[in-house]
Image: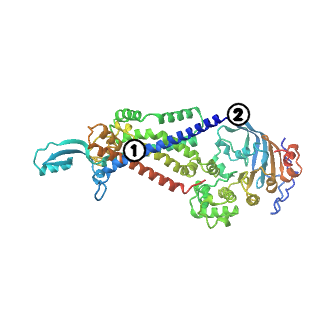
Amino acid sequence: MSKARRARNRIAQTTAFWLFRFATYAILAAATYIFLDIGIKGSRTLFTTHAPFINVPFFTQGPQTLFVFDHEGEKYTLSDREFRVWKTQHPVEVEATSVAYSAGGVWPCIVGTGLLVIGSMIFALAVGICSAIYLSEYSHNTRSLRLIRIAILNLAGVPSIVFGLFGFGLFVIFFHWNVSLLAGWFTLGLMILPAIITASEESLRAVPNGLREGSLALGATKWQTIRKNVLPYAIPGILTSSILGIGRVAGETAPIMFTAAYALRDEMPWQVQRWTDFVFQGVMALPYHIYVVSSKIPQNEYTERVQYGAACILLLLVFAIALASIILRERTRKRLSW
Amino acid sequence: MVVMEKEQIPHPAPPLELQKLPEPEPRQPVMINVDDVDFCYGAHQVLFDVNLEIPPRAVTAFIGPSGCGKTTLLRCFNRMNDLIDGARISAGRVRLEGRDIYAPDVDVVDLRRRVGMVFQKSNPFPKSIYDNVAYGLRVLGVNKKSRINEAVEKSLRASALWDEVKDRLETSAYGLSGGQQQRLCIARALAVEPEVILMDEPCSALDPIATAKVEELIYQLRENFTIVIVTHNMQQAGRCSNYTAFFYLGRLIEFGATSKIFSNPSQRQTEDYITGRFG
């Protein structure tokens, strides 16, 4: 090998190495930036400098309008409620600038997102596990099955805004459910269904065939085999896959903006007249709230507070749910190994 | 060209130094009849016109080189092949005590309870030892604790595992050694009180000591069960079977008492295989 060629090879080697390395570390950099940015700016909202160090009103109150004004040389930033109290004590006219959503907290949004996640995950897991069981345990490899697989893949590739419009057309308008939790559950559930089906099917297929045969050979029926000897061992894998689903359900804005989310609602979801109204009510949701406060109202120095606060809570919420799923999975997994 | 000379079958020599085999009845009833069976995986035919009569309360060994269809035939006896897409018996019948097991009115679940199976790769369930043995009873709907306890102990004793595991019945079956796992699988099959036990190379993954234990067990179980065992290991067939069937390329070449097959085979191919000239 010539000297020149050897040098060229070495340069190519080094370039490739650094290129790959750079690409990998770029991800790390981006992730760090995003988390630090939201974490730092968000924690200014979530935490306070004095005891109890947590900004309790931000977690427990609904969004309120912020009033900013000068009075006798002092600058006031008061929320809706505080301003009304203040006015009763100071019967003077003040020129107050109002900034929507920028006071109070995001409690109704947290509740709304929680409800959306719970409902849509129940729906998606129920339907998803059923069809995964069908696909992996019952179906034969026929033409219609291939069609089903293509449909699932396609469904996975549909942009979330299209799901939003679909849900709006079908559930909100055609079924007359209006903007409601129910419509949101089904829209979000359908959105993550392909991911749940694919992952559940994979974890079902990962259960060794010997367990199925062993069970059938003992005179168990197919359903007994699946229920007692296949499904329990696939549950950890299914849980793992649902972690991803939960993150998406909690964070997606597009599917709920037409189907389930209100920009502002004063009542909490449980403040309904009849219990049947519960599923037919719209809710506030964290991602939609972030969208509203960062693009639907005039921006100024007071709006950043709630934007980053809400974003930080959303991240924490997703982390918490993911952590819970991982712990649950590990506890289930400890009992099994093959 | 199936050779069945029942009248002339001498009783096989005692394989292990266990006990003397009872002399086979000259005209015994037949447990499993295989009548002119052809078997196909899709378009690929793997069994050709197999005729066989498996006697009850004896060990019948299937020997032959890989891919000769012995496992396929074994899995026909409890309809395990039903699980494979495109696999089917294209001609002939399999009868268990005279009844066609592929008849439309046959309950497969019931058939599989009567015809138990032990697999090549030991497949204990990821449950406790106790639950493994109790599994078959529970799926049958037996819930009475005392009855399950009794059956678990009986099966574990029958599979010579009781003394080794009686103090740790609640621990995972995965903590057992390979040989113990395989004997657990046998115990599991025994718990539902089958009439026939099919064994698909039960010792292929075991070391010689574990193999010896399993063989000894098979030898003892012969008294109460009809056992059909597929094996690659000719010494094993010689040691623990009463009858041997030799398969080659999907055909049954020879069937007879083990001692005869091993000492005086009537077919050239059998002799070549047994003496190790091929296979």
Which quadrant is the C terminus of chain B positioned in?
Answer: top right
Q: Residue at x 73, y 52 (%)?
A: B204
Outermost left residue:
A91
> How far is mark 2 from mark 1, CA to CA?
51 Å
Contact, mark 2 vs mark 1 (Cβ under 8 Å): no
Residue A168 in which image quadrant: top left
Amino acid type, label 2: Ala
Task: Give how far across and how far down residue A25 sits, in percent.
Answer: 49, 44
Residue B12 in which image quadrant: bottom right
Which chain is indicated by disc 1? A
Q: Secondary structure at mark 2?
A: loop
Amino acid type, label 1: Ala
Q: Are marks 2 and 1 on the same chain?
A: no
State the residue position of label 1.
A250
Task: Give how far across and how far down residue A322 sits, in percent.
Answer: 44, 50
Q: Secondary structure at mark 1?
A: helix
In the image, B162 versus B147, the foreground residue is B162
In the image, B109 versus B249, the foreground residue is B249
Relative to B232, say whether B209 is above or below: below
State the residue position of label 2.
B43
Q: Residue at x 16, y 51 (%)?
A: A85
Whether residue A26 is visible: yes
Q: Residue at x 47, y 40 (%)?
A: A193
Which quadrant is the N terminus of chain B positioned in?
Answer: top right
In the image, A255 versus A318, the foreground residue is A318
